[in-house]
Amino acid sequence: TFYYFMIIENFFPTNIGFVFNPNHSKIEDRLVKHCYGLKKKIPSGGDNWIARTYNTSRGKYDIYKDSKFKDLNAWIDEQVDKYISQLSLRCTRQGAHGWLNVYKKHDFQEYHNHVGYIISCVYFLKSDSKASSLFFKSPVQETSNIGSDLLVKHQPNGVVAYQPDAGKLIIFRSYLEHCVGQHLGTKDRITLAYNYN
């Protein structure tokens, strides 16, 4: 078929999902207390990071295998299945692992991705209005910064920020570069992170 007017197609979308846990208020205090208990017992991971944020990564402690997180992990599994279904991805959720991050004032996390996995998640367990956002960098890197008047969600490049509201789960493809801005709040920011095969 020949078209005598211009057709503009949108390819290579980046899909980031978010959902709020309706039971967050019932679990927050208990899991925050448990995270602080783990922090006292488990040495910090992330030895190769520039940022020195406390991090019980997969090499140190797996919260996915911790019975205290069982109900939350099951809810997150359900949300990952919904993400896969809504995007019609040709995969099924298999193994997973998780870790916790405690950000104190001035902590941050440099840009990184979770290569080797398909889907990753971040759950905001403890946060307030002064907590640092979670930033995602577009996988498309333009050589110029011309911008566009189209809606932000159609921008081909740039950065998107998600406010760390307590009880919010962010789900994204593991190849996406993401970082945490410098935490300027006086209260700790606690997140739980997961990788899925």
Image (tube, grey):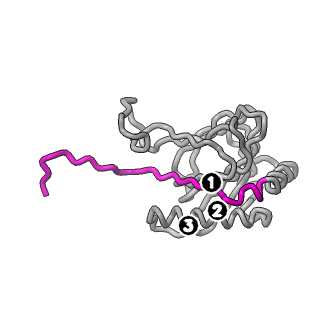
Alpha carbon separation for disc pair 2 and 1: 8 Å
Question: In the rendered image, which quarter is residue 109 located in?
Answer: top right
Give the quadrant of the N terminus. Answer: bottom left
The structure residue drawn at horizontal position 36% and vertical position 38%, both measured from the top left corner, is: 150
Alpha carbon separation for disc pair 3 and 2: 9 Å
Would you say the residues marked 3 and 2 are in contact, meaning their CB atoms lie under 8 Å apart?
no
The structure residue drawn at horizontal position 55% and vertical position 66%, both measured from the top left corner, is: 81
Indicate left or right for 194 with 148 as reference: right
Q: Which residue matches tag 2?
A: 76
Alpha carbon separation for disc pair 3 and 1: 13 Å
Q: Which residue matches tag 3?
A: 81
| Callout 3 amino acid | Asp
Neighbourhood count class around disc 2 (C-alpha, 10 Å): few under 14, some 14–19, many 20 upward:
many
| Callout 2 amino acid | Ile
- Residue 97 covered by magenta stretch: no
Indicate left or right for 23 with 152 as reference: right
**Stretch in magenta:** 1-28
Q: Earlier in the sequence, mark 3 or mark 2?
A: 2
Neighbourhood count class around disc 3 (C-alpha, 10 Å): few under 14, some 14–19, many 20 upward:
some
Q: Earlier in the sequence, mark 3 or mark 1?
A: 3
Label 2 sits on a secondary structure element that is helix
Would you say the residues marked 2 and 1 are in contact, meaning their CB atoms lie under 8 Å apart?
yes
- Residue 27 covered by magenta stretch: yes
- Above or below, 183 against 170 in this view is above
Label 3 sits on a secondary structure element that is helix
The label number, if any, that marks residue 169 in the structure image: 1
Q: Earlier in the sequence, mark 2 or mark 1?
A: 2
Quick one: 142 or 188, which is closer to the camera?
188
**What is the x, y in percent for residue 87?**
45, 62
